[in-house]
Amino acid sequence: MTKRLMSLAAVVLLAAGAAAADDLTETFDRTYPIDPGGRVGLENINGDATIEVWDRPEVRVAAVKRASSADRLASLVIEVESTGSSVFIDTRYPSSRDLAPADRHGHSEVEYTLTVPRTAVLDDINLVNGDLLVEGVEGGIDADLVNGDLTVRGAGGEIELETVNGSIEIDLGVGAVEDVDLSSVNGEIDVVLGSGAEIRAETVNGRIRNDVGLEVRKGKYVGASMSGAVGGGGPAVEIETVNGGIWVGVR
């Protein structure tokens, strides 16, 4: 890289840092009643999300809204639909046609921390640009990301995780785990089993490794696959990635 390009890169980084430092912020913190096995959903375009558990029949929605201008911040709306059996959080971002011309190239995001009943079902967790961390949820998880990493610890129930550009790291609980479906287009997938399972894993461009004694078969031209019972068998664990490796271990 030439000195000129290095200087330009440094200016861009400094400008980005200054913009982030000058962001306006606003907090959101509310609690909603829900059945212990109720469903929780989240839609967000920009920002990370963390989902934790507690032993209360409530969902706490804590969020930090950030925007590059007061108009953008005012137009960044968190909408919560609560019915008692479900809580769904939607994030409304400002449309460029509703902003002044000088503000149309700004930015806005919302970072969420949700606290849900341990036995709640995470249904329709959808993030576009952001990572997702889920800890201790035993009722099941359905999550889709576009650009972001998925990390799940102590999971139970039926689990379906998908990301386009990002990795998946999941530590299955030792309780009632049902079928598991994991998919990434560009990213690695690491799985730690808490008990027996029926494994089926495939990758197009990447290696498959495991600490559970299963044979890895290489494709005739590309790819690799692995299948078999671990610990006497159990729920089906399907793992697929296009560009990325796969690793399976056991606690």
Image (tube, rainbow, N blue to C red):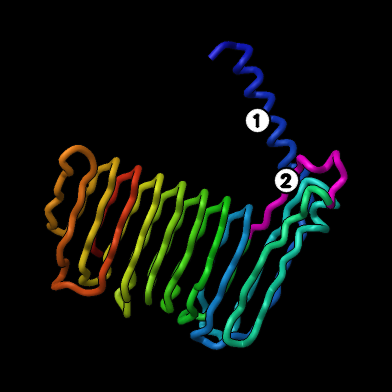
Q: Amino acid under label 2?
A: His
Q: Look at the picture and state if 123 lies above or below 72.
A: below
Q: In the image, is 125 to the left or to the right of 64?
A: left
**Whole-Å distance between the Cαs marked 1 and 2?**
16 Å
Q: Quadrant of residue 62?
A: bottom right
Q: Which residue lies at the image location 32% right of the left edge and 76% below the top edge?
A: 178
**Mark nearer the viewer, 1 or 2:** 2
Who comes first in sequence, dot 1 or dot 2? 1
Q: Disc 1 on helix, strand or loop? A: helix
In the image: residue 26, left or right of residue 89? right
Q: Is residue 56 left or right of residue 174?
A: right
Residue under the point 70% across and 59% down? 64
Residue 91 x, y percent position in the rendering: 68, 63
**Nearer to us in this view, 90 or 190:** 90
Please tell me which residue lies in front, 30 or 98.
98
On the picture, is 199 further left or further right than 10?
A: left
Q: Which residue is mark 1?
A: 13
In magenta segment, residue 107: yes
Residue type, mark 1 in image: Leu
Across and down, in percent, residue 151 comes to 43, 58
Q: Which residues are magenta?
A: 98-111
- Residue 235 picture location, percent across and down: 25, 73
Q: Secondary structure at mark 2?
A: loop
> What residue is disc 2 on?
107
Residue at (64, 85) in percent of width and height: 83
